Image (cartoon, coloured by chain):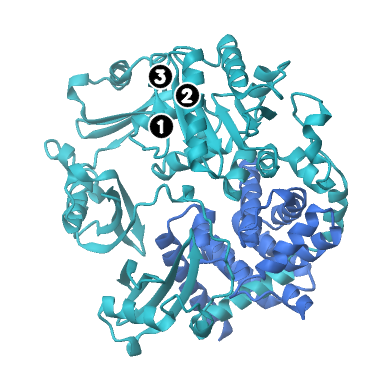
Amino acid sequence: MMTHEEIHQRIEKAAQHAAPDQLDAILSACKEQKGTVISMTNNNKKRRWLAPVSVAAALAIVVGSVFGISQFQQAKATDAVVTLDINPSIALAVNAKETVTTATALNDDAKEIMGGMELEGTNLETAVNAIIGACLQKGYLDELENAILVSVENTDQARATQLETELTNTISGAFQSGAILTQSVNVDDNLAQLAQQYNISAGKASLIQEVIAQDSTLTFESLAPLSMSEISLIASSRNLSTSGVSQTGSTSDQAYIGQDAALKAACDHAGIATGDVQGLSTEFGWSKGVMVYELDFCSGGTEYEYDINATDGSVVKYEKEPCDHTWHTSSSNTGTSTNATSFIGESAATTAALSHAKVDQSAAQSLTVKLDEDDGVAYYDIEFCCNGVEYDYEINATTGDVAKFEQDTCDHYAHRTASGNTNNSGNSGNQNQSSNSSGTYIGYDAALQKACAHAGVDASQITRLENELDRDDGAVRYEISFHYNGMEYEYEIDATSGTVLKFESERDD
Amino acid sequence: MILFTMAMPDARSGHNSQQLDDLILRMTQGDQEALASFYEATKAAVYGFALSILKDVDNAEDITQDTFIQVYRNASSYRSQGKPMAWVMTITRNLANSRLREVGRNLPLEDSHLAQLSHNPMVDQEDLLTLDSLLSLLDDQERQIVTLHALTGLKHREIAHLLSLPLPTVLSKYHRSIKKLNAAWKEADQ
C-alpha cells in the first residue's frame, strides 16, 4: 500500500518530467505589450496617479479591465468602484467627493452607450443619469426590459450602503418603472478573473455565481451574456435567493407570453389536454439563444419536458420518457420499464431522506433528486436545505435504505464572505507539526480526541489518519479523516473551541 | 538552499507562498528573472493541472504557456492573500476551460494521447504509467482534485473553492482516487 505522500510524489515526478520547457517563448511573449485602453477622456492630468506605477502595473490595467478597476480602487484618489449591469456593463471609479475618476466600458454594448460621453470629472449622479438616459434611448432599458444591477465595491460597508441608497434614488428618478438591484461586493481574484473573462462586472459575476450554486442546471457561461432582466426572471422563477441583493421595483415579465400560454403551446404540440397535466413545473430558462419557459409535466404515464420560446410560443426543444414518479404512474403503470419498477421512485426516496432528517417536506428548500449509480448500486442522491443546514443523502434506489448522509452549513453564499485572513503559512500539513501550532488553538491531538469522542471510536484503533490545520475564510479548523472498523470518518473541528463543525461517515469500500 | 526549495517544492506543504508572492511583486516591476524563477517553481503544477482538465498534451502545453503570460501581465492585479498557487490555478482553470469550449467539450481521447511524451527523454516508463492511470482510471473531477492536491499543496477546502465543488465531494473523490491509483500501481509494481 502506497501512502498518500508516495502517490503525490509519484504524480509530481511525472509532471516535473513531462512539463515542457517553454520559458524562452514565454519571456519573449511578455516583452510584447498589447491591449487597448477604453477611457472616456485623454485628460492626462486626471490619471496622474499612473505615473509612479511601473510599466507592468499599467499594462495590467490595460489588459484586464476588471483587474484594472481593482487597481483603481487601491489608488489614493479612488474611494469606491460602482458598476452598472443592464446589458451594457459599465464601471465607474469615484473619489471621496463622488466625482468619476475613470469610466470603463466592460462590454461592447457599454461601448455603444458610452461613445462620445465625457464622464470623467463629472459628478457620479450626473454620470449615472447620462448612462440610464442613453440606455433608454438605445433600447437597452424599457418597460419590458427593466432590470439594473448596481454593485458597489468599497471596503467600508457603511459607505457602500450609503452609495447604494443614493444610486437607487438617482436611477429611480431617471427611470421610474425600473427594477433596481443593489449590492455591495468584495472582489477576490476568482471573481475578478471570471468578470474579465466574460466581459461583465465583478458584481454581476458574483450574483451569477450565487444563482448557479443553487441550481446545477444553470451554468455561468449561459447566464453571463444575458441581460439583468433575463437573469432576474430565471432566478426568481426557480426560487433562487440572492442574499445581499436589495431590490426596488419588480422585474417585468410582460415581454413574454405567460405560463398558461406556454403550457397550452406544449400541450397542443404533445396532443394532450391541459387538464390532464400532472406535476407541472414551469421555470424561465435560456435555450438555444432565446428566453424559454421550461415546462416539466406528466400525463398518461409519460413525462414531458418542453422548452417553449417565451416570446412567440414556439417549441424550442422537447423530450418525453416514461414517467418514473410513483405518484404519477400509480394509476396507469405501463410496466414496460423494468428498471423503473424495480426502484422505489423519487417520491419514496425523498420521503425516506426527509424523515431521516426529521425535516418536513414543506420546509425543505432547493430540493433536488437525482438517480445516480455508484459501484453498480443505484442511489437517489437527494439534497435540500432547511434552516441554514444543507442535507445530502444517498438513498439506495432498490431498498430505500439511507446509504449515506451528510449535513453541512448551507453556504451557497460563502464565497461572498471576504477572506480577511492573509496569514496562510501554507505549511501546516500534518500532525507531526503540532508543536508549530499556535497556543491559541487546541492542537492536533486534542482535535483528534474530539472527533474520536464524537464518533465513539477508540483513537488507538484508527487507521489512515489525516489531520490538517486549515485556515480559510477567516475560520481556522482541523480537517481530520480516518478509518475505523470498516467505516471512513471525516471531521471538521473548530481550532479554537474544539466544537465539531461538520462530520461525515461512510462505509469504507 | 532557497533555490533548492524553489526547484523542488514539497508537495505536501505546498509551494513557498512567501517566495512566490515576492516573485509576483517583482514581476509587477517588469522583472523577467522573477518570471523565470516563478516558472521553474510552478510549471509542473500548471502543466499537470492543465493536462488534468484537457487530457491532451498539445493543448496542455499551450495553456501552460498562456498561463505564465497572463500571470506576468496581470501580476499587479494579484492581491496577496498568501495564496499565490490558488491564483495561478484559477488562471489555468479559466484558460483551460475556454480552450475546452473552443475545441468542443470532448477532446478525442485517443490511445496515443501520451505517445508523444514517450519521446521525451525526461519521461520514464513509470511516469507514463502514472499519467496514463490519471487519465484513464479517474473521472475528470477526480483527476483534477488529485492533481491539485499532489502538485500544489492546496487544501481540500481551497480545491473545493477552485473547482466550485462541495467540500465533501472533494474529500470523497480524493479518497476514492487514491484507492484506485493504489490498486492500479500495486498491480503494476508486482
The residue lying furthest to the top in this view is A137
Is residue A246 visible to us here?
yes
Circle 3: is it few (<14), some (14-19), or many (20+) Cα within 10 Å?
many
User: Residue B167, located in which quarter of the rendered image?
Assistant: bottom left
Which one is in front, A112 or A286? A112
- Give the drawing colour for chain B: blue
Q: Which residue is mark 3?
A: A310
The answer to whether A299 is drawn above or below residue A341 in the figure is above
* Same chain for the residues under marks 3 and 2 in the image: yes
Towards the viewer: A71 or B189: A71
Image x and y of residue A163, in percent: 52, 31
Label whose residue precedes the other's in the sequence (1 or 2) = 2
Snapshot quadrant of residue B132:
bottom right
Residue A364, numbered label: none
| Secondary structure found at label 3 | loop
Q: Residue at x 39, y 40 (%)?
A: A243
Residue linked to disc 2: A168
Chain of residue at mark 3: A
Q: Is residue A143 left or right of residue A459?
A: right
Quick check: A50 left or right of A433?
right
Chain whose colour in the figure is cyan: A
Q: Is residue B110 visible?
A: no
What's the residue type where badge 2 is placed? Thr
Quadrant assignment, res A376: bottom left
Q: Residues within 10 Å of mark 1 (few under 14, many from 20)?
A: some
**Closer to viewer: mark 1 or mark 2:** 2
- Seen from the viewer's position, the closer of residues A270 and A136 is A136
Is there a contact, CB below 8 Å, between mark 1 and mark 2? Answer: yes
Which residue is at 40% across, 28% downward?
A: A247
To which residue does mark 1 refer?
A: A246
Parent chain of label 2: A
Check the picture and name the quadrant holding the N terminus of chain B: bottom right
